[in-house]
Amino acid sequence: MNLIIDIGNTTTKVAIFDGEELIKHQILNQPSVSAIVLFSKVHHISNSIISSVKQKDIICNELITHFNALFLTHKTEIPISTNYNTLKTIGMDRLAGIVGANKEYPNKNILVIDAGSCITFDFFIDGLYCGGRISPGVQMRYDALHTFTNQLPQISISDAHFTLGKDTNSSIISGVQQGAIDEMDTVIDTFRKENKDSVVILCGGDYKFFDKHLKNSIFADPFLVLKGLNIILEFNAK
């Protein structure tokens, strides 16, 4: 069985796969050897992979050593082609998402939207990863408004939804949440107009919010990056 560890900006996602089948998964606020040993203790782990959007630190090195894990870098072999100019600096979870999407939807032009701490848009067109866009996530936008102004309140993402704000709070919610929705819908519209045989896949911690409010029809897959990491691990194990 394969152990997958995806260290993000806010949380760490861990999963166990038996071949291509996702057996179990968990979200950890803080990764540690002890927590992941507890998560995986009843399973026989044969291979492991770690992806991290952070710089390699003591905890990451401990995980690599303990699980004898493949640490995903720009030098790791992946089963897709890319013309991205700076693979050394790309968040490897972005590539993993595209790998997972290409497996699920072969021979399609693909847009993967990962709605997390940042919102990333990644494009796989004519069999090639072409790059994408990075913009602030919903909570980051709220935090920025509060931090860099004198009087605007701190607000968190919620199901409250306003197209037109009638007071300060609802105006902020409209600007942040509806603004992010409009951005996403615009990118999707443009992608579909320019690419035939296309598919749009949404993942990330805030996927449920956007899945409810986007005007466009999309596929939602919260496990897309984990699936992609598992595919990369299997690809390298062979």
Image: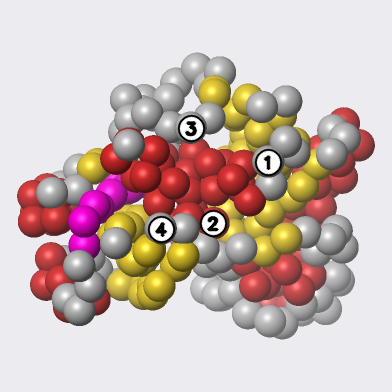
Q: Which mark is residue 19?
A: 4
Boundaries of the magenta span: 45-54
In this orientation, which residue lies closer to the viewer: 227 or 150? Answer: 227
State the image coordinates of residue 180 (x, y, percent, origin top left): 71, 57
Labels 4 and 1: the sequence-earlier one: 4
Badge 3 or badge 2: first in the primary sequence: 3
- The residue at which mark 1 appears reads as 106
Circle 3: residue type: Pro
- Give above or below for 164 relative to 113: below
Alpha-carbon neighbours of circle 3 within 10 Å: few (<14), some, or many (≥20)?
A: some
Give neighbour class at mark 1: few <14, some 14-19, many 20+ (Cα, 10 Å): few
Q: Nearer the viewer, residue 43 or 162?
A: 43
Numbered circle sitting on residue 79:
3
- Hey, what amino acid is under mark 4? Gly
Q: Is residue 140 left or right of residue 66?
A: right
Query: Does 85 sit left or right of 30 as displayed?
Result: right
Tag 1, which secondary structure?
loop
Mark 3 vs mark 1: which is more N-terminal?
Answer: 3
**Amino acid identity at mark 2:** Leu
Of callouts 4 and 3, the N-terminal one:
4
- Disc 4 versus disc 3: distance between alpha carbons? 16 Å
Location of residue 195 (image quadrant): top right
User: Mark 1 or 2 closer to N-term?
Assistant: 1
Residue extending furthest right?
Answer: 193
Q: Are marks 4 and 3 in contact (CB under 8 Å)?
A: no
Drawn side of residue 12 relative to residue 130, left or right: left
